[in-house]
Image (tube, rainbow, N blue to C red):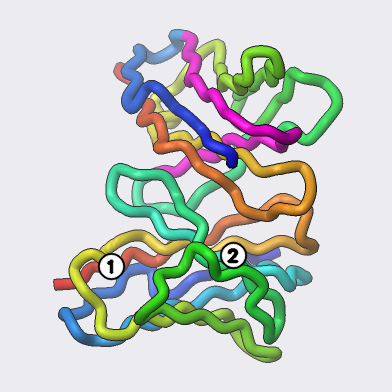
Amino acid sequence: AQSVTQLDSQVPVFEEAPVELRCNYSSSVSVYLFWYVQYPNQGLQLLLKYLSGSTLVKGINGFEAEFNKSQTSFHLRKPSVHISDTAEYFCAVRGDSGTYKYIFGTGTRLKVLA
Amino acid sequence: NAGVMQNPRHLVRRRGQEARLRCSPMKGHSHVYWYRQLPEEGLKFMVYLQKENIIDESGMPKERFSAEFPKEGPSILRIQQVVRGDSAAYFCASSSIEIETQYFGPGTRLLVL
């Protein structure tokens, strides 16, 4: 069985400061990893994904994430946040074969302060 | 290039009524997935459908919930005799083939009074 843990339910950060949102997963098989962003009362927008290849993945809006297999982590980072980055961020995992179910973490609420 | 469409965006029902949620996948996508997001929680898989077939409904409650994806028209998630605990955001996702990335719609927020 697979699971995703997002340890931080809320992360406040000042504008233009760097941020890291943590995601750890457990799985007995190889996985694909995703980060989605959800703005208030909106759907989920794909930020970035790791399927294979380079462990450093760049996404939209200046975000990037690094896949660390030994630590089973896929932390999301941005060097300088904007007020508009205030949203809920979800990490998700799915197996690399034979499964289509996404397993989501409980989300991290990023609040960017002026 | 329209994304995944869901309607209504907000739905209010009284206990005991029926709720019908619609999802139109992205153009060219024939795989549809429904997820439910309870307050303060992540999304949970409910059901996976292809045209006219339910592939996996292991995440659906056994009673009152049903889903379909007819040959023509949108996918429908139907909840009969709604209860307060059904209040949640219901998201639909679609993909072109099973192994590809799923793209999510804006969700339907169901409130049961």
Q: Are marks 1 and 2 in contact (CB under 8 Å)?
A: no
- Residue farthest to the right? A53
Tell me the quadrant of the picture where the N terminus of chain A can be found. top right
> Residue A49: in sight, yes or no?
no
Give above or below for A33 relative to A83.
below
Q: Report whether B83 appears left or right of A71.
A: left
Q: Position of residue B101 (x, y in %)?
A: 71, 50
Of label 1 and label 2, which has the lower sequence position? 2
Q: Which mark is residue B73?
A: none
Q: Residue at x 37, y 79 (%)?
A: B63
Q: Nearer the viewer, residue A111 or A101?
A: A101
Q: Report whether A70 appears left or right of A40.
A: right
Q: Residue at x 42, y 31 (%)?
A: A84
Pointer 1 chain: B
Dot 1, how many residues are within 10 Å of its Cα: few (below 14), some (14-19), or many (20+)? some
Callout 1 amino acid: Asp
> Residue B46: in sight, yes or no?
yes
Q: Are marks 1 and 2 on the same chain?
A: yes
Bounds of the magenta segment: A18-39
Q: Residue at x 37, y 22 (%)?
A: A8
- Res A77 → quadrant: top right
Give above or below for B61 relative to A107.
below
Tell me the quadrant of the picture where the C terminus of chain A can be found. top left
Callout 2 amino acid: Tyr
Badge 2 marks a residue whose secondary structure is strand
Read off the residue under disc 1: B86
Q: Nearer the viewer, residue B15 or B21?
A: B15
Is residue A25 inside the magenta stretch? Answer: yes
Read off the residue under disc 2: B33
